[in-house]
Amino acid sequence: MTELDQITKELLTVIDDKGFSQTGAYNLRYNGTALCHGDSEHIKIKKKTDKQGIDVYIDKNAGGEQVHIPVVVDASGMMDVVYNDFYVEDGSEVTIIAGCGIHNSGCNESRHDGIHSFHIGKGANVRYEEKHYGMGEGTGSKVLNPVTRVFMEEDSVFTLDTAQIKGVDSTVRKTEIYMKAGAKLFVTERLMTHGSQRADSDIVVELNGSGSSAQIISRSVAKGTSVQVFHPCAVGNAKCHAHIQCDSILMDTAQVRSIPEIGANHVDAAIIHEAAIGRINDEQVMKLRTLGMTEEEAEGVIIDAFLR
């Protein structure tokens, strides 16, 4: 078993709330290399030979198993690019816990770009959790740019749960999902920015098969002078149903732009979008203050509940 330093342990506690341990199927990437890794009976992880990254093979008997693939960067000036591919057999059920934590105590930018591709077999059920977090007292930026591509076969289910907790100075998220007949997609994105941070999120979902459905929910809080731009897009190319909902809380002098886009190329495609941006409700703050909370504490409670 590989001994982990205190910073790594602290970051893992935040980005992997299911509890990272060196058992079962796991791969811990640390400063650009695989620090430790293990397989389970039904999940095999292989290092790529042509570029940085891993291939994860999940067989049909992986009923409800978990695979943990966190990334930790604590070297100032590190630029880490990794390509991970997941191959999920028909009928499999698995939870994949990813996420990246950056600790930057220097003056140079630290950056991680994770390019993940998922090949989801017929009738498979996959849950993918990804949390991003930055810490450290240095002046160098902490940058995370995830790319997620998902290819869903018939009657598969994919749940994407992403969260940017705090401390990330810049992020550009790109997500592409292609769905066949009967496939079901659930996306929840939660995002917090503060200071002068910026976050851009582009999500494109193509519903290409009859009976496919997608639910995309984005919730965010923008503080300070931070800037957020959301561009979720759902395109119906068959009889299908999709719903996009974007809700944001705006504080201080921050800026938020929400640009939901829907398209229908089939007469039986039903695509809906909603978007709302506003400040914290004063009545909610007042009610919590009558319970003895300060204004700051009340706002914190509201924000936590909103992003949950």
Image (spheres, rainbow, N blue to C red):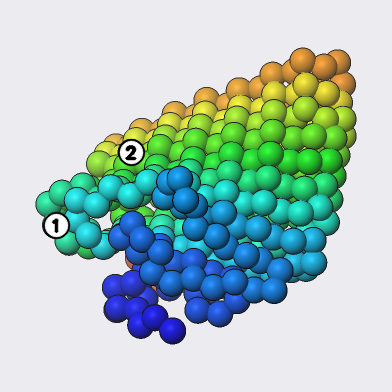
Give the numbered dot on residue 106: 1
| Tally of numbered tags | 2
In this view, 107 is above or below 35 = above
Q: Look at mark 2 in the image and give the residue it sits on.
A: 198
The image shows residue 28 at horizontal and vertical percentages of 44, 67
From the viewer's perspective, is residue 242 above or below residue 142? above
Residue 156 on image: x %, y %: 79, 47
**Image check: 186 left or right of 129?**
right
Q: Position of residue 22 (x, y in %)?
A: 50, 79
Q: Is residue 253 visible?
A: yes
The N terminus: image quadrant? bottom left
Amino acid at pointer 2: Arg
What's the residue type where badge 1 is placed?
Gly
In terms of depth relative to the viewer, which is nearer, 32 or 307? Answer: 32
**Mark 2 surroundings: few (<14), some (14-19) or many (≥20) residues within 10 A:** many
Identify the residue at image location x=75%, y=67%: 62
Q: Residue furthest front?
A: 49
Report whether residue 164 is seen. no
Residue depicted at x 62% and y 65%? 44
Residue found at x 69% / y 33%: 178
Nearer the observer, 50 or 43:
50
Q: Does 251 sit left or right of 276 as displayed?
A: left
| Residue 161 locus on image (x, y percent) | 59, 53
Q: Earlier in the sequence, mark 1 or mark 2?
A: 1
Distance from the alpha carbon under mark 1 to that under mark 2: 20 Å
Report which quarter residue 217 is drawn in: top right
